[in-house]
Image: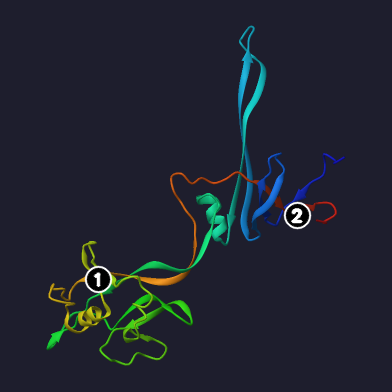
């Protein structure tokens, strides 16, 4: 039997495991394990109703009901599974050969002597490379220019490989300027200030969208996709103020 004088301190955050719940209410297979938590707390609330009567209408009996226990946890890291449990039905679909829509900003340069300097010398974008996967690089758009060491020329078509269609170009107010924006148009925009006869000139800022290939893990967040119900167990250490032992 524990003494009413026993006191303990808790320094470490808990490791928390989520389990499916069997039909008999017992924990089933684990579906999520969290060992990188920053905070884990338990809060309890309840409502009360009173029976009153007699002179002065004092409280005679009080019933507690409607108890709610909230477990709050904050994780330093996340996983597709933890996001799926919080935002969807807990299902994560993994696939290869998927594509992700990316957007970068194309800032137009000033007018130079003799011709229109349409763009900066490079844009920063996430591109996909067959050997290195997706990476964030500076893409130099000069006409046959030599990029600095370690950087990438647009001539390598990194921005346009593995796409379902050519990229799209939007004005900064969201107006679609070209839904079939090719690499040749991008180079022309850099060199002359216009991609074609549509009259896209320097002095503008554009949003440039394109697709990159990726190995994807997909969760579904929708109006009919709800988190499940789980058995949750947390493990931590408590240290005795007398013995100093956990």
Nearer the N terminus, badge 1 or badge 2? Answer: 1
Verify CB contact (< 8 Å) between mark 1 and mark 2.
Answer: no
In the depicted view, which residue is nearer to us: 48 or 148? 148
Q: Is residue 173 left or right of residue 162?
A: left
Which secondary structure, mark 1? strand
Tell me residue 94's x, y (percent): 52, 63
Which secondary structure, mark 2? loop
Residue drawn at the location 29% of the way across and 92% of the way down? 145
Q: Residue furthest right?
A: 1
Residue drawn at the location 35% of the way across and 77% of the way down? 124
Q: Is residue 174 left or right of residue 54?
A: left
In the depicted view, which residue is nearer to us: 34 or 46? 34
Tell me residue 47's x, y (percent): 60, 28
Please, is residue 117 above or below residue 9 in the view? below
Q: Is residue 114 left or right of residue 130?
A: left
Please, is residue 44 above or below residue 92 in the view? above
Q: Residue furthest top?
A: 55
Determine which of the numbered discs, if any, sits on residue 34 in the image.
none
Q: Residues within 10 Å of mark 1 (few under 14, many from 20)?
A: few
Tell me residue 15's x, y (percent): 68, 56
Tell me residue 138's x, y (percent): 36, 81
Look at mark 1 in the image and give the residue it sits on.
Answer: 180
Please, is residue 234 above or below residue 168 in the view? above
Spatial CA span between label 1 and label 2:
60 Å
1 or 2: mark nearer the eye = 1
Residue drawn at the location 16% of the way across and 73% of the way down? 200
Rendered image quadrant of residue 178: bottom left
Q: Residues within 10 Å of mark 2 (few under 14, many from 20)?
A: some
Rendered image quadrant of residue 111: bottom left
Query: What is the quadrant of the C terminus in the image?
Result: bottom right
In the depicted view, which residue is nearer to us: 109 or 171? 171
Look at mark 2 in the image and give the residue it sits on.
Answer: 237
């Amino acid at each position: 039997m524990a003494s009413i004088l026993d006191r303990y301190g808790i320094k470490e955050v808990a490791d928390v495991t989520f389990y499916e719940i069997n039909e008999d209410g017992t924990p089933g297979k684990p579906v999520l394990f969290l060992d990188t938590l920053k905070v884990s707390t338990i809060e309890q609330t309840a409502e009360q109703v009173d029976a009153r009567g007699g002179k002065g209408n004092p409280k005679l009996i009080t019933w507690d009901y409607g108890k709610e226990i909230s477990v709050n946890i904050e994780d330093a890291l996340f996983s597709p599974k933890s996001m799926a449990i919080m935002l969807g039905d807990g299902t994560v679909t993994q696939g290869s050969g998927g594509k992700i829509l990316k957007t970068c900003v194309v800032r137009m340069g000033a007018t130079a002597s003799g011709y229109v300097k349409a763009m900066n010398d490079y844009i920063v974008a996430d591109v996909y490379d067959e050997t290195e996967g997706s990476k964030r690089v500076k893409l130099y758009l000069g006409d046959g220019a030599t990029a600095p060491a370690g950087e990438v020329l647009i001539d390598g078509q990194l921005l346009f490989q593995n796409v379902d269609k050519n990229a799209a170009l939007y004005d900064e107010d969201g107006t679609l300027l070209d839904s079939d924006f090719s690499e040749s148009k991008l180079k022309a925009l850099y060199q002359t200030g216009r991609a074609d006869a549509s009259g896209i000139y320097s002095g503008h800022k554009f949003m440039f969208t394109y697709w990159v290939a990726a190995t994807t893990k997909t969760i579904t967040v929708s109006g009919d996709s709800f988190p499940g119900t789980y058995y949750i167990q947390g493990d931590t250490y408590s240290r005795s103020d007398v013995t100093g032992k956990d």
